[in-house]
């Protein structure tokens, strides 16, 4: 008797399901035993020109301490969280114990690091995981620094000690759905009422905002039309933050869309040092130096991984590292990293001597992200198929670099800041559109 085709298909699909499709994926070290996955982090081979020689003993110690923690504690768990797009709350006490949060701020339980020390710490975090470094950047170099530089003495004493320990977490909200690059035109309003202020509006992309205890928020004063800053408590009635889903980079970072519906902020939580958008420039000067170091860390991690991988995996009877084309790519990556490190280091020295200009900081950020983009792209190629798996770091780093290329001023905006400084001619706004002439 002839069995109907549909019946055959049903049976085949039942069998296929039980024998293939129900099985979990093989552990990558079993499925692909030739190369060590990123959970065992490679030793650092990317610091070819020995940056340590340019660092103080305190900066070297910070570098070592952060590197050890990241390689041992974070590398083994990061892929799991990145895949699930969840924040690794279990790492907060470990990052807190490093005593780097608060960076350059002195007193109030903060470490009082040099700008170089703080930047090196961030790069070492980014070398292993860029989401963790973004978490620290937003918390420490944006929110804490705003309170440190532009807050009142009472606000510093009240907020900084627990933020430095990471026993409370902060975020920093400037960007809005309609105002990204054009942030100074933001529309969230702050209206003075008895005893405080009412915030009304929206923010977008705000890192850490879904769980932050303290939100540093910028809004337009309805009386003066100037930008003011506020510290908003997580449980303030009318405040809501929703996670932005489906990101392809920095997947562990919880970026939120924030709604302010008549949120009351008491007078004591208005930041007295923010009276116009220009006042944020003191914070952005430091944070832009910090951001310029994140692509350095990311590119170093990718190079370190590629260097180990190419020696471990063989094709055509030889390690991949033996092929001239692969060596050329490795050397190009290494050259980029040395140049990026020197740009980053020089930027720190210019800042520390009080000479750094906004254009110099912007060039450091834009140029380093551009070189890092090239570096991680070469790294992705070098790992072949495994270059698209998060298990070997480079695919993850490749994706993580994209938002860093875009945040804290996109590549273009930072380029235009430098362009304006070197020519004296701003070119942010297009020429006014002329009415169409009918010839
Ligand atoms: C993962 C992630 C985390 C972030 N975290 C935070 C945070 O914690 N806090 C916060 O406040 N913000 C945060 N941001 C927002 C970030 O700073 C903005 O995304 C960024 O400023 C760019 O704004 P936009 O996305 O609206 O792009 P748009 O401004 O819409 O720009 C789109 C494109 O147009 C180009 N462009 C815009 N204007 C010009 C011009 N004048 N000339 C030439 N080109 C131009 C840009 O370069 C870009 O290529 C985050 C963003 C991301 C992706």
Image (spheres, rainbow, N blue to C red):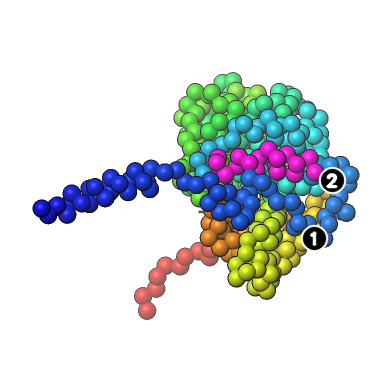
Residue farthest along the top direction in this orientation: 195
Rendered view: 65 above or below 45:
above
Q: Quadrant of the C terminus?
A: bottom left
Measured in 3D between alpha carbons, the distance from the residue under mark 1 to the one under mark 2, in whole angstroms, is 16 Å
Residue 324 found in image quarter = bottom right
Please give left or right for residue 109 compared with residue 200 in the image. right
Q: Magenta residues?
A: 64-82
Instruction: Identify the element where label 1 is drawn.
Output: loop
Residue placed under numbered mark 2 in the picture: 60
Q: Which residue is mark 1?
A: 48
On the image, the x and y values in percent for residue 394 come to: 60, 55
Q: Earlier in the sequence, mark 1 or mark 2?
A: 1
Q: Position of residue 29 (x, y in %)?
A: 58, 49
Q: From where the camera sits, is residue 233 visible?
A: yes
Name the one closer to the observer, 353 or 208: 208
Q: Is residue 71 magenta?
A: yes
- Relative depth, front residue between 283 and 321: 321
Which mark is nearer the camera, 1 or 2? 1
Q: Position of residue 261 (x, y in %)?
A: 46, 30
């Amino acid at each position: 008797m002839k069995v109907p085709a549909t019946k055959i298909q049903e049976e085949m699909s039942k069998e296929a399901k039980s024998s293939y499709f129900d099985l979990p994926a093989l552990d990558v070290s079993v499925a692909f035993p030739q190369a060590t996955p990123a959970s065992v982090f490679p030793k650092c081979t990317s610091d070819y020109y020995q940056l340590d020689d340019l660092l103080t003993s305190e900066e070297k110690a910070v570098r070592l301490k952060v590197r050890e923690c990241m390689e041992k504690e974070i590398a083994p768990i990061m892929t799991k969280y990145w895949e699930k797009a969840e924040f690794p709350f279990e790492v907060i006490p470990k990052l807190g114990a490093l005593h780097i949060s608060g960076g350059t701020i002195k007193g109030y339980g903060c470490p009082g690091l040099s700008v170089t020390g703080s930047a090196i710490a961030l790069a070492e975090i980014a070398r292993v995981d860029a989401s963790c470094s973004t978490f620290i950047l937003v918390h420490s170099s944006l929110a804490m620094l705003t309170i440190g530089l532009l807050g009142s003495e009472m606000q510093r004493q009240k907020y900084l000690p627990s933020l430095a320990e990471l026993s409370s977490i902060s975020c920093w909200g400037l960007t809005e759905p309609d105002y990204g690059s054009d942030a100074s035109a933001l529309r969230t309003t702050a209206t003075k009422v008895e005893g405080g202020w009412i915030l009304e509006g929206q923010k977008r992309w705000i890192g850490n905002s879904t769980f932050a205890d303290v939100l540093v928020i910028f809004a337009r004063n309805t009386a003066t039309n100037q930008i003011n800053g506020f510290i908003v408590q997580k449980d303030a009635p009318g405040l809501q933050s929703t996670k932005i889903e489906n990101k392809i980079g920095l997947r562990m970072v919880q970026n939120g869309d924030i709604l302010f519906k008549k949120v009351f902020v008491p007078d004591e939580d208005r930041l007295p040092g923010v009276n116009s958008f220009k006042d944020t420039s003191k914070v952005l000067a430091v944070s832009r130096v910090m951001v310029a170091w994140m692509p350095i860390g990311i590119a170093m991690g990718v190079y370190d991984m590629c260097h180990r991988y190419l020696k471990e995996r063989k094709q055509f009877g030889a390690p991949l590292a033996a092929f001239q084309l692969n060596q050329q790519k490795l050397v190009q990556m290494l050259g980029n990293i040395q140049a990026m490190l020197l740009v980053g280091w020089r930027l720190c020295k210019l800042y520390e001597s009080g000479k750094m200009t906004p254009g110099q900081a912007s060039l450091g950020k834009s140029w380093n992200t551009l070189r890092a983009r090239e570096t991680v792209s070469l790294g992705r190629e070098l790992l072949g198929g495994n270059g698209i798996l998060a298990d070997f770091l480079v695919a993850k780093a490749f994706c993580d670099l994209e938002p860093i290329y875009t945040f804290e001023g996109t590549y273009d905006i930072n380029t235009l800041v430098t362009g304006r400084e070197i020519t004296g001619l701003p070119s942010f706004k297009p020429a006014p559109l002329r009415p169409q002439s009918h010839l």
